[in-house]
Image: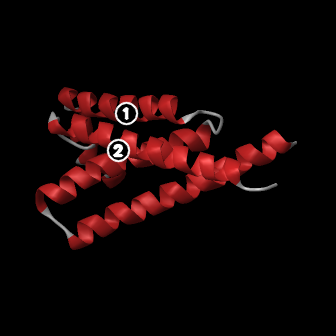
Amino acid sequence: MDDLRGRRAVRVAAAVAAVLTVAAGLGVRAVAGGEFAKCAGDALYTVLVYALVVLAAPRLRPPPAALVAAGLSWAVEFYQLTGVPDELGRHSTLARLVLGSTFNPPDLFWYLVGAALAAALHTAAARRGRSRPR
């Protein structure tokens, strides 16, 4: 039962992280522009993917979760080379937000930054949770 409670706590934390990440992304776009907002948005995209991965698989530890999140982000970026995301984005705002439109090689770096940041935060939160008295 304790394991179930632990997974539930991880899922709640991941859901909160996902909401906060979306808010951070919207905030960055509201107060900044240009290259900074683009790079921050790319990193936050992968932080969001990371949170959703942990929400789906709460037992996943930070390094594999970071690899999955970065891998999914890279897969979406390379998928843009097909032109399909661009076409879908013309008909759906959600598709445009999730899949983007055009391949941009520097985005691959910022996805790694986001995955590393998310893994560092996940590790810190896990350590903090383990150090609490029960």
Which mark, by number, is residue 37? none
Quick check: 5 above or below 16? Answer: above
Q: Residue at x 88, y 42 (%)?
A: 1
Residue 116 appearing in the image: yes
Outermost left residue: 34
Amino acid at pointer 1: Ala
First in sequence, mark 1 or 2: give its number: 1
For badge 2, the amino acid type reads Gly
The reply, left or right, for residue 45 in relation to residue 100 is right
Q: How many marks?
A: 2
- Report the front residue among 132 and 106: 132
Residue in the picture at 27% in, 65% down: 28
Residue 24 relative to residue 79: left or right = right
Secondary structure at badge 2 equals: helix
Circle 1 sits in a helix, a strand or a loop, which is it?
helix
Say whether marks 1 and 2 touch (CB < 8 Å).
yes
For the residues marked 1 and 2, what is the alpha-carbon distance in whole angstroms?
8 Å
Circle 1 crowding by C-alpha within 10 Å: few under 14, some 14–19, many from 20? many
Disc 1 designates what residue? 70
Position of residue 59 measured from the top left corner of the image (x, y, whole percent): 65, 35
Residue highlighted by disc 2 = 114
Q: Which percent across, then down, holds residue 118?
A: 44, 46
Residue drawn at the location 11% of the way across and 60% of the way down = 34
Is 54 drawn above or below residue 25 in the view shown?
A: above
Residue closest to the far bottom: 31
Q: Residue at x 25, y 44 (%)?
A: 100
Residue 91 in view of the camera: no
Q: Nearer the viewer, residue 89 or 114?
A: 114
Expressed as whole percent of the image width and height from the top left, the position of residue 127 reads: 61, 47
Badge 2 density bin: few <14, some 14–19, many ≥20, Cα 10 Å? many
